[in-house]
Amino acid sequence: MTTRRELLQLVGKTATASMLFGHRRASAAQSETRYTTPRRGRQLLELQQRFVDLRFGMFLHFNMATFQDREWGDPASSPDLFHPTALNTDQWAAAARSANMTWGCLTTRHHDGFCIWPTKTAAASVGKTSGSIDVVRAYVNSFRKAGLRVGLYYSILSLRDDVRHFNVTPAKIQLIKDQLTELFSGYGEVDILITDGWDAPWSRITYEEVPFREIYEHIKNLQPNCLICDLNASQYPAGGLYYSDVKAFEQNAGQKVPEGSDVPALSCVTLTDGWFWKQRDADGHLKAVTTIVDEWLEPLNRRQCNLILNTPPTREGRLSPNVVSRLEEIGKAWRHTGPMAKLSEHVVITTRNLATGKPIHASSYPETVGPDLANDGDFRSSWYLDEAQTSGWLEVDLKKRESFNTVSLVEPVGQWGDYSASRIRNYRFEYWNGENWVRLTGGETPMRTTIHRIPHVSSRKVRLLFDSSQRMPHIAEIGVYDEPG
């Protein structure tokens, strides 16, 4: 079976310690959506800081695939196949503590669609057929008893429920919301929700089909202090918090945290060769302690990134002896050293880009390169000036008067070997008030991804002007957003 990493590679080729525990195009109807402000909890920056300060966590892939030697379970299987004979979540927590981990995250529903708790929805649930086992309940109880924080993983993609691209219906969106309501109403405080199978190149379920902002608000209204992290790093610039409170990087898929990264982040990687336990793993290859500590954990922590190491339970519901031993070895080689450096505040994008696909014009452009490459929703394409020109502009016609309070500029720094730093010397955003262009915001040399929150304005036209410091600057994407709150 094709693995997740192979799928991603194929797509790429074609286009503290316990004291710290304290796409793109929308329909006309969707364009009229108005959002509310979720119930208020702690400040986002405080929550992000608390999360990265945890430094090191345990990922637990345990679901139907465990019993099939697969990475994705067979959605047509009977839930009765899931039958751990010696479930021991206390052992999971003890092993995490032995490695000096501070939190965990359990796969409550993977891409096959089986719920690992006794859901009251009509969906398939292993908890209904395995002696009323509630693995989520056992997990959260064990980890909290051990002084560990808890996170949950939930796949938006569900093959069994046919939640797929072009097959999403209001009833399926309601199913997702109902299941998330169960998870966030019945299991106590959850620090982070990791979502997957959403706006991914291999699932293609867009943030409009399953509306991101609606789900985001749903979670925040249930638990305002829960962070949302969507595994979408392959689709969006590494320097921006697009559809995530915490930026995710999947090391198994080749996603790396850039040097100098300052966004709150997590990086997930496997201790075994795969995400779910395979029978061969009992005597199989495990990542070396030096690799985990010296090459991953410590360097990532210096980049304000929390490492989450996947240690899959066996079919019995326990961690195998070789995994337990390796975690103990990690704990002897690494100690939690306290809080990380203070995070900077970053704007989180949760709504659609109003500029995507709208008419756009430019001061100039070479043959075959149009300004539409700067608002096509693809951060890998870009518009650039004619050779020898050192200043330019882009102007987007939103086609009607829109209210917005966030603008962004993404430059493809690092995308090619000869584009290692910004080529822009200064820039500014302006809007048309009906008579004149009025400055919104601006600055000198931008970051790779620059997102500005501004006072609300209403206009039909927005433009970006800039001067370059080197030859031929590129603009990968400009953004115009109406963010709630």
Image (spheres, helix red, strand yellow):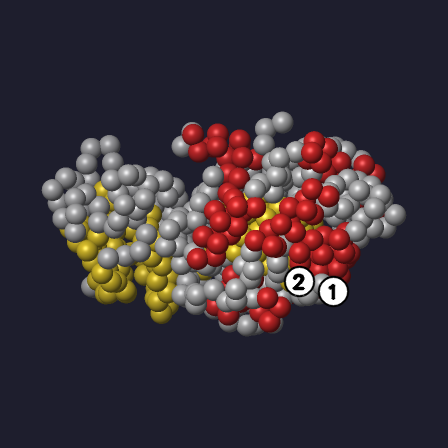
Q: Residue at x 39, y 55 (%)?
A: 261
Nearest to the observer: residue 284 or residue 239: 284
- CA gap between label 1 and label 2 equals 7 Å
Q: Where residue 232 is drawn, which disc sits there? A: none
**Residue at numbered disc 2:** 148
- Residue neighbourhood size for the residue with mark 1, other residues' Cα within 10 Å, grouped as few (<14), some (14–19), many (≥20): few
Q: Residue at x 36, y 55 (%)?
A: 260
**Left/right of residue 12 with respect to residue 84 in the rendered view:** left
Tell me: residue 91, above or below residue 271: below
SS class of the residue under badge 1? helix
- Residue neighbourhood size for the residue with mark 2, other residues' Cα within 10 Å, grouped as few (<14), some (14–19), many (≥20): many
Residue 68 placed where, x, y %?
A: 73, 33
User: Hey, which residue is sitting farthest top in the picture?
Assistant: 1
Residue 444 placed where, x, y %?
A: 22, 60
**Residue at numbered disc 1:** 145
Tell me: residue 269, above or below residue 424: above
Tell me: residue 3, above or below residue 310: above
Residue 12 quadrant: top left
SS class of the residue under badge 2? loop
Tell me: residue 226, above or below residue 320: below
Nearest to the observer: residue 295 or residue 400: 295
Q: Residue at x 33, y 57 (%)?
A: 450
The amino acid marked with disc number 2 is: Leu
**Left/right of residue 416 with respect to residue 223 in the rendered view:** left
Residue 239 placed where, x, y %?
A: 39, 53
